[in-house]
Amino acid sequence: MTRASSTAQRFRQTARNSSSDAPHCGCGGRRLACPRTLLGERNMAVARPETILATKIRNTEPDLAFWLRKAQSESGRSTSSMIWDMVRLARRRGRLRPIDYLRYQLYRPSLSTAERASFVSPRGGHDVNARLSPPSLELLSSLAVDKVLTNVVLRAAGFPVPDTRAVFSADANYGALSALRTEADITAFLRNPTNLPVFGKPVNSSQSVGAASFLSVSPDGAEILLGDRRSVSLAALAAEIAKHFHRGYLFEELLRQPPEIVAIAGETIASVRICTIWVPGGPKVLYAGVKLPAPGAMVDALLGGENTLVLIDSQTGDVLRAMLSEAGGRREITHSHLNPEAPIKGMRLPNWPQVVAITTEAHRMFPGHGILGFDVALTTRGPVVTEVNTDPHHALYQFCADRGLLNPEFRALFAAAEADLARRQNDQRLRDAAFAP
């Protein structure tokens, strides 16, 4: 039996056995035959029943049988033909998993082989990023991962970032920033009404784990109101932060959005994702999009709710397309799912030239990185950089644009960026050699 045939047989067996409550084998997804590897689990930040905040990433295994039935119904194709597609694409540069193939609806007969192969999985996207950001830049990557240090560096360079109110850390020192060392310090900080409202997030987590907005404290100081309107024990919250986020937890200004953004997204910040790429001539925007939060959410991350993902014209800031992410797939919408009276398609985001200028210039703060992902909040005081990602995910673009990351236009830019990175590195080596003793 050939390797491809063996892999296809495992895909078929997985499809027959798949269900939403299928047991994990315990390998952590490392084995090729593991359903977690074959299906491509969806990661979600979740609050466990005994916690207040989302304290971990839960790997949820998709129901491959459901997705295959949906694909057959929509395309009229046989299961075996789609499985062979999956096998071939898994071996290509994009490293597509079956669930990527199904969620992006790559089974559509209207797509060419080249168009299918242009899509990437999270791992395939990481490979693209890694080629543009060499391992030698580990120090700069570590800086960008630390949200406090990122804010300090960007603020010192004159870029707009949220105001830091306090940082909890048992060990780290952030200079003049207000330091909270203990659970009691957290309680005292949040119990003081003058410190609220405030937004909190772990110093070095991703996918919005542990992020929340804290609005007000009860008159007796026993409970605190969260952004999702839950009233919880302040003591329990402080204990949870100290226990689960002991490496650091950042309290910062709760940003406010202008009325035109509130109309489509509500009060929760809808982050603009700007992916920049350093090509000859300097950084430019590769693509831009917006994540509109799910109803009742405190963050805009993809936590399993009905998020809307929006594709933006990177030149003008105009909304090109809005796709609602649902449990059964996606569908294009023209108006906000939070406010059906508010149109999305065709609207122009405020202060767009500033957004582009801020992110492309901020990219120059990380000169060795060929590609970066910036999260920007559109606020009442203008664009504010909330995060810098050295290994950005590209699902938002692929999902909204219905186009793979490895499309011909982007591949040409990636090649130019790689060549320019090699030139800059060589120039740096020559400068170092010229000043060597």
Image (cartoon, rainbow, N blue to C red):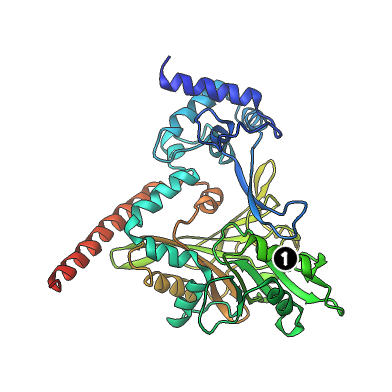
Residue 23 horizontal side relative to residue 94, left or right: right
Give the vertical position of 392 relative to 105 (above or below): below
Label 1: which residue?
A: 239
Q: Nearer the viewer, residue 161 or 267?
A: 161
* Residue name at image x 45 percent, y 48 percent: 125
Task: Answer with the quarter of the image where residue 290 lies.
Answer: bottom right
Residue 264 lies, in percent from the top left, at 69, 65
Q: Amino acid at mark 1?
A: Ala
Q: Quadrant of residue 251?
A: bottom right
The N terminus appears in which quarter of the rendering?
top left
Q: In the image as oriented, which residue stretches furthest toward the top?
A: 1
Quarter of the image with the C terminus is bottom left
For image coordinates 42% across by 62% down, the residue present is: 141
Q: Which residue is at the front of the view, 109 or 427?
A: 427
In the rendered image, residue 411, in percent from the top left (x then y), is placed at: 35, 49
Whether 429 is drawn above or below 158: the answer is above
Mark 1 Cα shell of 10 Å, populated few (<14), some (14-19), many (≥20): some
Q: So how many labels did they put on this image?
A: 1
Expressed as whole percent of the image width and height from the top left, the position of residue 103 reads: 59, 40
Q: Please tell me whether mark 1 sits on a helix, a strand or a loop.
A: helix
Q: Is residue 285 visible?
A: no
The residue positioned 70% from the left and 52% from the top of the image is 306
Locate residue 189, reporting x and y percent. 70, 79
Give the residue at the far right of this rendering: 220
Residue 26 appears in the picture as rendered: yes
Give 145 or 289, whichever is nearer the viewer. 145
Task: Say whether residue 197 is left or right of residue 389.
Answer: right
